[in-house]
Image (cartoon, helix red, strand yellow):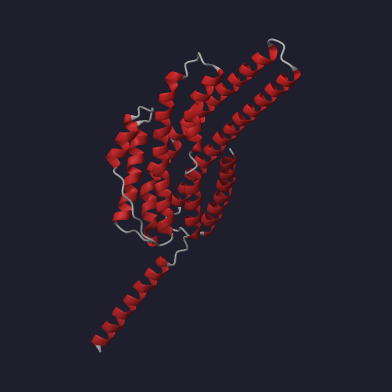
């Protein structure tokens, strides 16, 4: 009789364990996956970095005697550093999307080589950002090594949040907001000066004057689009940081209705900024 009672108790314990496991595996991570995929798409739009790197070459056309030659190499190094940082953010978003689909990831990247490569560019990237980028890589490497599944997504979110926030809100955001914007302001001033000097001196023919005015308008429109791209990319960085913080805050209830609603709202906002970036 005692044996039968013990057996029933054991069966009940097993049944309870199975229910817990099934409940964990049934967590709906669709919203997490969609947000991660959209964030991945948004952070991969790094054409804005290439545009920034090419700004001194564009300015040299309008001011050949300016100090642009000395800035070309610096801008290219800085752009390369930013692209490597953004690639790590994209890698993490890809990993999170894959894990949210209950699949394993395959990832290999040498942390020391990456951070050393960025540091050697002398692009003004702080040791804090380098450390955060390295920590983010280690998080993805750990997830790949441990063959994380969807029920363990909370673990990678918890581990990645601090370095991701530092990466998105630190040097990367400051360089886009300050350095990119400053260069575009300088470019606008050079465009005005360059074309106005032709229009205000000599006696250009009516046809030449119209052509110059059209070229000036075109170049200024391109400059304005680049400014819009900077604004859009800053929103992308902020919304990705905001979304991941929400994931971190709700990491033990990733299918909560309020979180799902917030994530889908962020997806809509990110797609709006992606369209702006695509048009720029």
Seen in the picture, residue 252 relative to 208 is either above or below; the reply is below
Where residue 247 sits: x, y (%)?
A: 46, 51
In the picture as drawn, the residue positioned furthest to the bottom comes out as 1
* Residue at horizontal 69 percent and vertical 10 percent from the top: 202
Seen in the picture, residue 73 relative to 198 is either above or below; the reply is below
Q: Is residue 166 visible?
A: no
In the image, 236 versus 84, the foreground residue is 84
* Residue at horizontal 44 percent and vertical 67 percent from the top: 26
Where residue 240 sits: x, y (%)?
A: 49, 45
In the picture as drawn, the residue positioned furthest to the top comes out as 202
In the picture as drawn, the residue positioned furthest to the left comes out as 3
Please give the count of numbered marks on the rendered protein: 0
Q: Quadrant of the N terminus?
A: bottom left
Quarter-wise, where is residue 212 in the image?
A: top right
Q: Is residue 248 visible?
A: yes
Seen in the picture, residue 233 relative to 265 is either above or below; the reply is above
In the image, 141 versus 190, the foreground residue is 190
* Residue at horizontal 44 percent and vertical 27 percent from the top: 75
In the picture as drawn, the residue positioned furthest to the right comes out as 206
Where residue 56 sits: x, y (%)?
A: 49, 23
* Residue at horizontal 51 percent and vertical 35 percent from the top: 48
Where residue 191 sits: x, y (%)?
A: 61, 21
Q: Quadrant of the C terminus?
A: top right
In the image, 139 versus 63, the foreground residue is 63
């Amino acid at each position: 009789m005692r044996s039968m009672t013990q057996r029933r108790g054991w069966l009940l314990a097993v049944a309870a364990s199975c229910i817990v496991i099934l409940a964990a595996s049934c967590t709906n991570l669709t919203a997490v996956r969609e947000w991660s995929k959209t964030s991945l798409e948004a952070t991969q739009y790094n054409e804005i970095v290439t545009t920034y790197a090419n700004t001194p070459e564009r300015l040299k056309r309008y001011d050949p005697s300016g100090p642009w030659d000395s800035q070309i190499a610096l801008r290219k190094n800085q752009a390369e550093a930013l692209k490597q940082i953004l690639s790590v953010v994209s890698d993490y978003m890809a990993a999170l999307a894959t894990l949210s689909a209950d699949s394993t990831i395959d990832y290999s990247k040498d942390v020391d080589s990456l951070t050393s490569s960025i540091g050697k560019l002398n692009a003004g990237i702080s040791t804090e950002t380098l450390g955060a980028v390295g920590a983010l890589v280690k998080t993805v490497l750990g997830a790949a090594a441990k063959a994380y599944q969807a029920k363990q997504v909370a673990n990678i979110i918890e581990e990645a949040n601090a370095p991701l926030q530092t990466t998105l809100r630190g040097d990367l955001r400051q360089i886009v907001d300050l350095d990119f914007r400053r260069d575009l302001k300088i470019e606008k001033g050079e465009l005005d000066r360059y074309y106005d000097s032709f229009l205000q001196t000599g006696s250009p023919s009516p046809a030449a004057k119209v052509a110059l005015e059209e070229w000036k308008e075109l170049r200024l429109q391109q400059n304005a689009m680049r400014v819009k791209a900077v604004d859009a990319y800053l929103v992308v960085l902020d919304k990705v940081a905001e979304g991941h913080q929400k994931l971190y805050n709700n990491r033990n209830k990733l299918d909560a209705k309020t979180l799902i609603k917030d994530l889908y709202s962020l997806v809509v906002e990110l797609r709006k900024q992606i369209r702006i970036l695509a048009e720029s």
